[in-house]
Amino acid sequence: MAEKQKLNPFQIAQQQLDRAAEVMKLDPGIHAILREPMRELHVSIPVRMDDGTIRVFKGFRVQYNDARGPCKGGIRFHPEETIDTVRALAAWMTWKTALMDLPLGGGKGGIICNPKEMSMGELERLSRGYVDQVGRILGPEKDIPAPDVYTNPQVMAWMADEYAKLRGYYVPGVVTGKPLPIGGSEGRDSATAKGAFYTIREAAKKLKLSLHNATFAVQGYGNAGRFIARFLHDAGAKLVAVSDSRGGIINRAGLDPQAVEKHKRETGSVVDFPGATSISNPELLELDVDILCPAALENQITGENAGRIQAKIVAELANGPTTPQADLILHERGVFVIPDFLCNAGGVTVSYFEWVQNLSNFYWDLSHVQALLDKTMTQSFWEVERAADKYRVDPRTAAYVVAVSRVAEAIRLRGIA
């Protein structure tokens, strides 16, 4: 636990970049540019609470790099949000969009708050207040937010509407992850997990592992966690354990993902699901399963527990769940890690599709969205594999090499450095 408390997510992001820069012999000037955010805005958001009092919330928006196009990245509401977490996530978004070869840069936003203790009215006023403060640096041609931890399509709808008030007309392309009736995209709600499923499928091919009857565990049962459980289950894999912020459950005979989802909706947690026994989050990570899906928060697999991870594939649906020290240990032990900014890039890829549909005012059906997503994720997976073979490095470093080389090329061509 002490190690987790000492870890700074932005320093981790910088360490990951530094390793890739060394491997690819990146120009020192470009390396220096890419180690720091291009721009960040800190704001104070006054909100009238339901009891009539005024509370002031701290918020951030980090625009990390826009060499390849407008910044893109989610907004998270979290009581333990920090500027360094937002910086790290903005950096990872830069590499994620580049890795998917999207014409976008990277950004991220956050507000320090506990949405679980706020009413819908308070959340709406907070969401609108955030846009009032940061709207001057947002726009479909500048910076396009999306949902993240504890935000959702309703929050995006409020933000899009508030931006429309600022501009005087509706601009659907200012945010993605919106509800369908106001310019959202088919497939966006499940996109992160669908993209992760495609990369797990390709990793299983590489390792000659059949998904049929493969065992898997999911840490975190929010949007990404519940959908990946459903997709792997539909492919014939067996869900044996799942957890959320209150605890976990295990049943070696298998769990029905949708029954667990229903239980969580009704009770607020997966805990006490009928027929399952309790398990802690740390215990879940160390289970003997074929596929482990960390879909919660950062720094879950560290140098302290990496030696006890038994999964063949670690599919990082969360951002930054594995520390650099753990990466080295897992690679040496032969555990195949699908790095976060490859594994969970389905969300930003379909967000890009949504943005394109908004700009053209022409909308696609679900089968078209998923076919394009499958093609993009599969192509990116094997580009990373080729880089890993060429440079003889772990998958995360290989993914960085592919992504950073694309951003570096844009910087050189534009004459930024």
Image: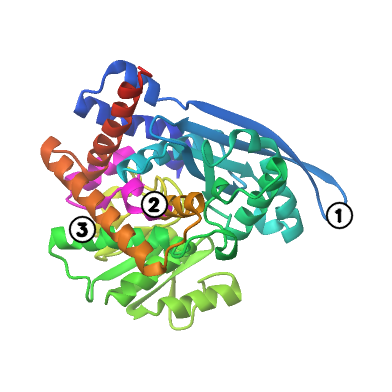
Tag nearer the camera, 1 or 3: 3
N-terminal label among 1 and 2: 1
| CB under 8 Å between discs 1 and 3 | no
N-terminal label among 1 and 3: 1
Towards the viewer: 191 or 220: 191
Q: Which residues are magenta?
A: 322-347
Q: Which residue corresponds to mark 1?
A: 51
Horizontal and vertical percent position of residue 205: 16, 62
Image disc number at residue 203: 3
Kind of residue at disc 3: Ala
Placement of 266 over or under 290, stated as above or below: below
Callout 3: SS: helix
**Viewport quadrant of the N terminus:** top left
User: Which residue is rendered at x = 31% and y = 23% of the image?
Assistant: 413
The answer to whether residue 121 is seen in the rendering is yes
Q: Classify 10 Å Cα crowding around label 1: few (below 14), some (14-19), many (20 and above).
A: few
Placement of 275 over or under 261, stated as above or below: below
State the separation of the CA atoms marked 1 and 2. Answer: 41 Å
Give the tally of numbered discs.
Answer: 3
Q: Classify 10 Å Cα crowding around label 3: few (below 14), some (14-19), many (20 and above).
A: many
Tag nearer the camera, 1 or 2: 2
